Image: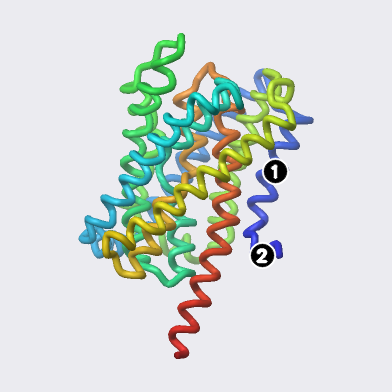
Amino acid sequence: MLKMLALDRFTVLLFVMVILASFFPVYGKSADIFGVITTAAIAILFFLHGAKLSREAVIEGIMHWKMHALVFTFTFALFPVLGLLAKPILVPMLGQELYWGFLFMCFLPSTVQSSIAFTSVAQGNVAGAICSASFSNLIGMFITPVLVSFFILGQSDHGFDPTASIIQITLLLLIPFILGQILRPYVLPYMQKMPSIVKAFDQGSILMVVYGAFSSAVVAGLWHQVSGKTLILLIIVCSVLLTLIMLLTLYIPRWMGFNRADQKAIFFCGSKKTLASGVPMAQILFIGQPLGMIVLPIMIFHQIQLMVCGVIANYWAKQSAGADQE
């Protein structure tokens, strides 16, 4: 049952970090030092992401521009529109800060690793998924700050300069990613020899960010602001959004005439949001804001999407296996 629900070690550790931060938060000078270490870890993480990405697969996938345009539309148009339309309902229900977090989640790019993994399991267009998910993350480094500027921080009392945030995101995420691509022939062989270490660093850096974000939030009184009832409502809201998006990403590609393999890639790339890029972006974009409240929706949505996509990918894999046998 746990395997079916995709409750892997990383998911469990995410909850452990939240619990650890709730009882033993890092603060003061220790938090400053921890923040510097976390920033360095995130830069290395995106360097490794760049080194892992196959140029051949990207070149093969990039030719399928119609599929990428549709995934882009789901990720950066449909998600934000639904998030904005839900404001009259969600602000009274969740409060302003959690709604900001929900809207920020809607502005984020798609996931990379899980989108590709689920597409592969379901026997979809893997090359197309690699290109769509990677392009989403790269363009998201520029689009997400602009959307946040107009629709979140631009509506608050805090001044916000999207240009400065884009520069910070470029330095922290994009440049390491590009360096990883350039040095891929030299770095990848070592990564392939140590996959467990690479995976541990990949997940560990995100866990560090989550622990740091929730530590600062707990020190600021997060759990006095978010009740059990509000948490349950947030889970329901994220589930409803995911259900609606998945129905649209399932039926619109069919209506547009995409083949079965492309439909699977569009479904997995267009319905998900990234935690790996989202939390580092939140650290840069929401300086001085209640960061724990901001990242809580993406953490919840991330887990729900993994569980649901895990079940669907396995179901489609069995369907494909049955069709092959026939």
Number of other residues with Cα within 10 Å of mark 1, as a class: few under 14, some 14 to 19, many 20 or more: some
Residue sitting at the far right:
23
In the picture, the quarter occupied by the C terminus is bottom left
Q: Which residue is label 2 attached to?
A: 3
Q: Nearer the viewer, residue 202 or 322?
A: 322
Which mark, by number, is residue 15? 1
Residue sitting at the far bottom:
326
Q: Dot 1 lies on which element? A: helix
Q: Position of residue 85 (x, y in %)?
A: 43, 30
The correct choice, above or below, for 291 with respect to 134 in the image is above
Q: Position of residue 30 (x, y in %)?
A: 67, 24
Q: Nearer the viewer, residue 79 or 214?
A: 79
Q: Amino acid at mark 1?
A: Phe
Which is more foreground, mark 2 or mark 1? 2
Residue located 46% across and 9% down the image: 157
Answer with left or right where residue 50 lies relative to residue 325. Answer: left
Mark 2 vs mark 1, CA separation in Å? 17 Å
Q: Amino acid at mark 2?
A: Lys
Residue located 47% across and 65% down the image: 192
Answer with left or right where residue 68 lies relative to residue 272. Answer: left
The correct choice, above or below, for 181 with respect to 226 in the image is below
In the picture, the quarter occupied by the N terminus is bottom right
Label whose residue precedes the other's in the sequence (2 or 1): 2
Residue located 36% across and 63% down the image: 263
Residue sitting at the far top:
157
Residue 44 shows in the view: yes
Image quarter for residue 145?
top left
Residue 186 shows in the view: no
Decide: marks 2, 1 in contact (CB < 8 A)?
Answer: no
